[in-house]
Image: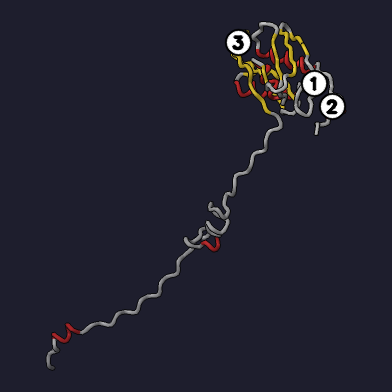
Amino acid sequence: MPPKDIKNQNNETKAPAAAAPAAPNKVTPGRRMRGDTARRGGRGAGHGRGPGGGRGEPRERAKPEFDSKIIDIRRVTRVTAGGRRMNFSVSVVAGDRKGRVGVGLGKGSDTAGAVEKATRDAKKNMIKVPLSPQMVIPHAVEAKYGSVLIKVFPARGSGIVAGSSARVVMELAGIKDVCAKFLSGSKNRLNNARAAIEALKHLSPIPKSQMKPKA
């Protein structure tokens, strides 16, 4: 038999084998494929972090009914059989700026607990101050608490003229155009605040005829 043409044998090209069908993507349970935004909703469909939804707008915090301010913080030491124990004593003034105000005292091993107790005590001891529609006290008054003597009187057009913790009491009570003057030299902030509260207690109620705002 004649020998085969080696050149032709080398030039022969084999037909390409048929491509095997691609294996389908396996999806494990509980996992979703990338790009499956229609199922997830996507970031623009109201389920992501975008402007269309997601976490949404931050919720507005409810405004507290009463405002409070700390007027004094002291560290006190108590001697016991086991040794000395350090505690904190906190004085707080709380009010709604609409005529209700109170002073409280709280003690605790830490400042946070003492402040919470003082605020709770101030809310329990609140008083209602008789005020005109212009948030002004009806008349002048004097009061005494311990060794503190205070005089409070209306001062139209001057704002709040008061020092020490009496100013905090007037602000949180919502009183405007008032002057508070201490006639004693006490520097105890808690007693000064309680003296201001005592003075506001002695205010006479305003007649209903004067409660109507002037046109």
Q: Which residue is mark 1?
A: 138
Is residue 16 or residue 89 the one in the foreground? Answer: 89
Q: Which residue is at a point 84% across and 23% down the rendered structure image?
A: 206
What element does badge 3 sit on?
strand
Residue type (three-letter) at the residue carrying disc 2: Gln
* Residue 198 drawn at (x, y percent): 76, 15
Label of residue 77 in the image: 3
In the picture, which quadrant includes the C terminus? top right
* Residue at screen point 64% across, 18% down: 71
* Residues at circles 3 and 1 in contact by the CB criterion of under 8 Å: no
Residue 18, horizontal then vertical, whole percent = 34, 79
Q: Is residue 8 above or below residue 186?
A: below
Mark 3, Cα crowd under 10 Å, few <14 / some 14-19 / many 20+, is few
Whichever of callouts 2 and 3 sits on the residue coming sooner in the sequence is: 3
Q: Extreme bottom residue here?
A: 1
The quadrant of the rendering that contains the N terminus is bottom left
Mark 2 surroundings: few (<14), some (14-19) or many (≥20) residues within 10 A: few
Determine the residue positioned at 84% across, 22% down: 205
Could you tell whether 199 is left or right of 190 in the image? right
The residue labelled by disc 2 is 210
Mark 3 to mark 1 CA distance (whole Å): 44 Å
Q: For marks 2 and 1, give the CA distance.
A: 10 Å
Give the mark nearest the N terminus, 2 or 1. 1
